[in-house]
Amino acid sequence: MVTIAGFAGNRGRNLLNLDDLEPGGATLEVIVTNHTDAPIIEAAATRGIATIIVERDDGEERQQHEARILDELEPFDVDLVCLDGYMRILSGWMLEQLPTTLNVHPSLLPLFKGMDAWGDALDAGVRVSGCTVHVATDVVDEGPIITQEPVPVRPDDTVGSLKERILYEGEFKAYPRAVQWIAEEVIEITENSEGEPAVSDTAVDESAYPAHRLVSEDRIETLRYGENPHQTAALYGDYTVTEPNLAHGEQISGDKGMSYVNYVDAAGALDIITEFEEPAAAVIKHAAPAGCATAYQLDEAYDRALSTDPMSAFGGIVSLNRPCDVSTAEQIVESVKDIVVTPGVEADALDVLGERSNMRVIDVSGGIPRPIGPADRTVDWTMKPIVGGTLIQDRDQQRLDPEHLEVVTEEVPTEAQLETMAFGWSVAKHALSNAIVLADGTETVGIGQGQVSRVDAVHLAIRKAREHAEGKGPDGSVLISDAFFPFPDGVELAASAGIDAIVQPGGSRNDDTVIEAADEHGIAMAFTGQRCFRH
């Protein structure tokens, strides 16, 4: 068991958090401070943690002061030292006497070293800051990095608010993680050829993927293969993510595991379904929606979603934002589906779903079946790896408020059409660009997506609605476009299919001719002023 000596000059909140969590079984044995009035002293006494108070005397040499600290610390059998706002640079001599010593800095080193990392981040206008846990050296904010935790910088952040959020959302995650890795011997602190500290991964196995990413993620499993059999793949998980997610979902039915493509598709299915507060269901194929609907009852929502394009739904993914009930389960097993993603399953419904042994059911409720929706979307950004780096962006959390739409045609959308525009926009966000969604009420009618021209996307949506949808079609529907119409041809095609209303971002140089075409055909059109591309 790893024992910790914590060095703190103030409140030592990271040390108290380590004491609460005991990551990897590590225990906080003693607090060292050089201030008799440090608040950590009272907190340690309340918790029964020993304290060492060694103030530096006037004129006392630095090494003499450090030697007195070491003398006081000697009776404690300490394996690890954790610094937390100690505000004194430890000399190389002292660090040699101490066991491995960690420090946490409130930025993503090497950016924003120094005393005011929060203010420096705000002054630089960065969108993401965070914290770094590293091995302490006698050079300020240097030493090999063990782990980092990103924290988004919000437009209204002040130094105070950013400081608090980096502590609670960053340091409270990263420091325990680093201690746990050391306690469980996942990593090893050694010396490099120059005699300087170095961090290495201790895991050795036959996988082509490291068992541990020293950033923030653990390998959950090595997958059978990637998108194609000639590609290898692995799944890593971040245990600090609290919103429902596939990486930590529980497979509760199905006789085979998840593949790389399964995870990609199922993650997209879960992402779209949490857009809605009402009972909702979606059918996903190749990470794109084939149908989506909300209704008063879950089984009705599923029926409406499936009827958009049952042909494409064959072998697809079903996602629900309510625990799966028996009626919905009975509908699901009527046709071939690969995966069901749901925030819990009623006992009788699981028996029904289990009738299809090759259909996997993933429970993302965390063991507490419940409705999920927009309030559960806690991750603020998305990441997409590219060769040589990673792209990071804000998550698309925009929701369409009908009151903020700009009506640009003589024909004014009805209240029902405005509601459909808001629903359809939440679906279009998840369709592949160029994307066109046809909707009626709060259900999709046809979806055209992934086309290189917008008019082709309109063609596809209309054809899907006419040829694939069951019991519905394009006539009288609302068209939702993820970006502006560059020409009136898409509007004219919509009019020929009987579409009554259109919502689109606007902003084209040809807006006037597009609006003119809508007026000519008696179509109501509104502009959002914002687009929702998905690539």
Image (tube, rainbow, N blue to C red):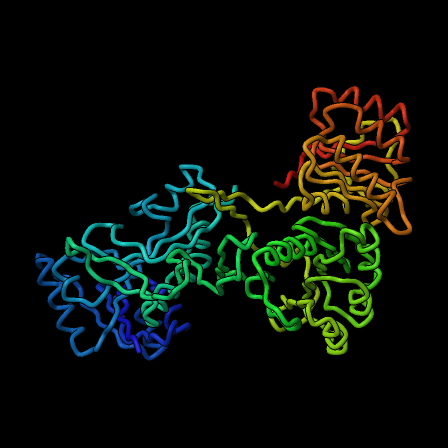
* Residue 495 position in % (x across, y down): 88, 31
In the displayed structure, does residue 493 sit left or right of residue 273? right
* Residue 14 position in % (x across, y down): 37, 64
How many numbered marks have been drawn onto this rendered protein structure?
0
* Residue 124 position in % (x across, y down): 40, 37
In front: 278, or 30?
278
Q: Which residue is drawn at 24% across and 72% down?
A: 79
In front: 202, or 116?
202
Outermost residue, front direction? 230
Q: In which quarter of the image is the C terminus?
A: top right
Residue 173 occupies which quadrant of the picture?
A: bottom left
In front: 162, or 184?
184
Q: Residue at x 51, y 47 (%)?
A: 383
Q: Is residue 156 visible?
A: no
Q: Residue at x 43, y 43 (%)?
A: 389
Q: Quadrant of the N terminus?
A: bottom left
In the displayed structure, does residue 369 sit left or right of residue 498? left
Residue 198 occupies which quadrant of the picture?
A: bottom left
* Residue 382 position in % (x across, y down): 54, 48
Residue 439 occupies which quadrant of the picture?
A: top right
Q: Is residue 100 visible?
A: yes
In the displayed structure, does residue 98 sit left or right of residue 382? left
Q: Residue at x 14, y 66 (%)?
A: 97
